[in-house]
Amino acid sequence: MSADFLYTIEVILNGLMAGVLYSLVALGFVLIFKASGIFNYAQGVMALFAALTLVGLQEGRVPFAHLINAVFGTKVHHFDWTLPAIAAIIFTILVMVLFAVLVEKLILKHLVNQEPIILFMATIGLAYFMEGFGDLMWGSDVKTLNVGIPQGGSLWFEDFTIGWAAEGEKFYGMYVDLLDVWAAIIAISLVLFLTVFSQYTKSGRALRAVADDHQAALSVGISLRVIWVLVWSISGFVALVAGMMWGAKSGVQFSLSLIALKALPVLMLGGFTSIPGAIVGGLIIGAGEKLFEFFMAPIIGGATENWFAYVLALLFLVFRPQGLFGEKIIERV
Amino acid sequence: MNVDNTKMMDIKNIVLRFGGVVAIQNISFDIFKGEIRAIIGPNGAGKSSMLNVINGFYHPQEGEVWFRGKKRGSMKPYQIAHQGIARTFQNIALFKGMSALDNIMTGRFTHMKKSIFSQIIWAGGASKEEYENREVVEKVIDFLEIQHIRKTPVGALPYGLQKRVELGRALAAQPELLLLDEPMAGMNVEEKEDMSRYILDVNNEFGTTVALIEHDMGVVMDISDRVVVMDYGKKIGDGTPDEVRNNQAVIDAYLGVSEH
């Protein structure tokens, strides 16, 4: 095989892996949108907040340290303990569940039967509040997150592929980041889990039921409020997974919340109501933007990754507004 | 039908208003344990509103609902479902994207008690509970003779079968009181006969108390034990089918009264 061909494969492979991370963020959007028709603008910030909380708990940081120091003139910053990763993850899940309960009690409960645009505005408010709250609680410095996921290139894969190039070609094997591989494995498990959960458990069925028909759901004994807490908890959990992966890859920093914007084209491609759509959409965007950069950047100048996804999404909006997997939009006249 | 004249439900002086419109004006009636109780009346008489009061979608401004000898406080519809009241809707309200089987499984919601944690790890009894309830559902499916459409998304089913799946979802709850809002609307004669048979069988075999709204007079008179007649939000008749048939106010409401 020629080296150019192998490079292309490598680019696609890495693009797909990067796409998995987009998918993880998009997944959280889909879950909430399907169950309650709310486009949750705060999904990206939830990922950031979850990652901040995870690092904070793991390193034993004092929450609100800046505030405490400013008010009392103290100099606290860390407790003298650290938590093992798994314990920190479990506590963070509990925090995200608590967050879901608060969102329901303080926001959603008061906005029942409001227009979708009002609920959307509420989530924008929520996003900015959480960003500020996260800053106040854990500080705005970039934090390194290490939960024990292997990182760096896979030497095994390099050795495995190095012999693929033709004799005499310059090729040193394919580079695949172990973290990306783990992210892919975790994303796949997450989707399998969500599928099984929604098919074969009472709560999963209740989630789907509420997404379909509120009145009928009530009539079989399903409490909408409990379901909303459940849905926000699950997407809080998905946000944690996404935040953990992004955080491990590029540090926990506030630009993480901007990643949520990349989930938008993913959703336009995959459809706002489809879990497989979120995954496939992420993969297409991930592989597409890397390939485009690889081939087109030398011709039209670099930095195509910044806009390629959005242009692709625009094209989709024109030709297939419901996305690849979304429910058909049927207008009755 | 083992009607033993104990009151399962007692509805006392219900008044329901929407703004200035009075949908239900001071209506009282009771439902005996084990009977088939029909509510009939012309369009806009307030029959569906009455059903919505019973199952908690509407909260009447005045009046009381007594269920199993206790006065019912202000309750949400889902809480009322947990008390053992199931219903169907006039304009079928199924979960369109889900299979017939899954729709009927949601009817078991009130019987499944395992914690969310148990469901997540699919252990600690959640799987056992799932299988047990699945068995109940399979019995309902056999009873309604819809084995062949178990896995079909209900949105793709013809109207008559959708009605049957909706009945199945209500039956799966094994309710004490089953509310049916026009179970035979839009059906052909054959489908109506089937549906009548299912309602009678449910009542006979499981002793389920049924309250239903229906337009087809023939069917109503055939299958009900007692009938309430409503017109313009008022009760104008109450009794056995024969009594109601010979009630002058009822005849006037249905046939129209000539001005003298």
Image: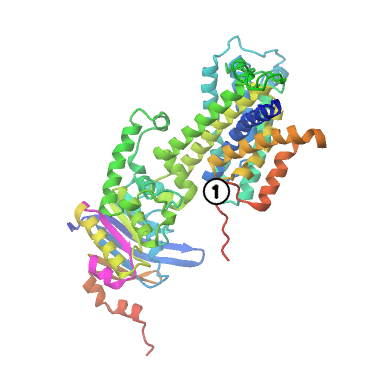
Looking at this rendering, what residue extends furthest in the bottom direction? B260
Q: Is residue A191 above or below residue B217?
A: above
Taking the image as shown, residue B242 lies to the left or right of residue A300, namely left
Q: Is residue B187 above or below residue B168?
A: below
Q: Quadrant of the C terminus of chain B?
A: bottom left
Q: Is residue A201 above or below residue B184?
A: above
Q: Is residue B162 above or below residue B260?
A: above
Looking at this rendering, what residue extends furthest in the front direction? A167
Taking the image as shown, residue A228 lies to the left or right of residue A167, namely left
Q: Chain of mark 1?
A: A
Q: Quadrant for residue A157, please give it.
A: top right
A178 in magenta: no
Q: Position of residue B157 (x, y in %)?
A: 40, 57
B222 in magenta: yes
Residues drawn in magenta: B206-223
From the viewer's side, name the closer residue of A266 and A116.
A266
Q: Position of residue B11 (x, y in %)?
A: 32, 59
State the residue position of label 1.
Answer: A112
Taking the image as shown, residue A39 lies to the left or right of residue B181, namely right
Density class for disc 1 (Cα within 10 Å; few <14, some 14-19, many ≥20) is few
- Whether residue A305 is visible here, answered yes or no, is no
Q: Position of residue A232 (x, y in %)?
A: 54, 37
